[in-house]
Image (cartoon, helix red, strand yellow):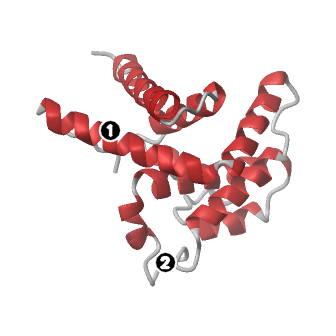
């Protein structure tokens, strides 16, 4: 099996799960927002995509507080991309794996005093104000980022429902558990 096959299967799985949860169960008709969340889930299957932000010297950053500091050293699209990644990371962990937050925000971690929900919402709103491209697709992405910031709590709830749904399906099917950690 080639590498495209697993990615296509993951995309179908997460698209179906996200559409079902947001459109059917929650009544959220925003297809662009739902597509963004589905794409986020597919991207974040790989740990290197979750922690893709690097310092100017190339060192990987794994804590949101340090990403916030790094974004202060950037301008324009680079700053917007870091803010977007902060939104994505906080949405992912707080929505899909809230049980991991105590470890991510442990006493000896830079994120100890951060409120992931507030930081994620703020990061998406900031990213939505920074144009990354001047084409139509870039403007559409900015609109989706703004909605993610404005509807952050609803998106957190939706991700929690997605997790419950796939865990329920795994228990009922007797199949293997899908692990993203």
- The CA span between labels 1 and 2 is 31 Å
Is the residue 87 above or below the residue 118 in the image?
Answer: above
Q: Is residue 29 visible?
A: yes
Q: Report the quarter where the N terminus lies.
A: top left
Please name the residue shown 34% across and 51% down the image: 181
Q: Is residue 53 visible?
A: no
The location of residue 179, given as percent across then percent down, is: 29, 44
Observer-side mark, 1 or 2, equals 1
Q: Is residue 93 left or right of residue 131?
A: left
Furthest residue toward right: 134
Q: Quadrant of residue 98?
A: bottom left
Please name the residue shown 30% across and 37% down the image: 166
Q: Residue 63 bears which disc, if any?
A: none
Residue behind mark 2: 109
Local secondary structure at mark 1:
helix
Q: Is residue 50 left or right of residue 138?
A: left
Please name the residue shown 54% across and 66% down the image: 63
Q: Quadrant of residue 178?
A: top left
The location of residue 9, given as percent across then percent down, is: 36, 21
Residue behind mark 1: 165
Please name the residue shown 59% across and 74% down the image: 114
The location of residue 136, given as percent across then percent down, is: 83, 23
Is the residue 63 above or below the residue 93 in the image?
Answer: below
């Amino acid at each position: 099996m080639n590498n495209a096959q697993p990615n296509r299967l993951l995309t179908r799985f997460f698209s179906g799960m996200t559409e079902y949860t947001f459109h059917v169960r929650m009544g959220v008709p925003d297809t662009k927002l739902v597509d963004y969340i589905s794409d986020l889930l597919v991207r974040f299957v790989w740990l290197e995509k979750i922690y893709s932000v690097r310092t100017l010297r190339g060192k990987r950053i794994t804590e949101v507080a340090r990403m916030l500091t790094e974004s202060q050293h950037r301008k324009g699209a680079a700053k917007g991309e870091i803010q977007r990644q902060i939104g994505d990371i906080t949405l992912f962990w707080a929505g899909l794996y809230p049980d991991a937050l105590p470890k991510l925000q442990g006493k000896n971690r830079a994120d100890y005093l951060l409120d992931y929900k507030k930081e994620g919402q703020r990061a998406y709103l900031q990213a939505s104000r920074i144009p990354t491209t001047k084409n139509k697709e870039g403007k559409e992405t900015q609109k989706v980022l703004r909605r993610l910031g404005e509807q952050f709590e609803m998106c957190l709830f939706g991700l929690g429902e997605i997790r419950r749904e796939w865990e329920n399906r795994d228990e009922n099917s007797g199949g293997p558990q899908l692990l993203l950690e």
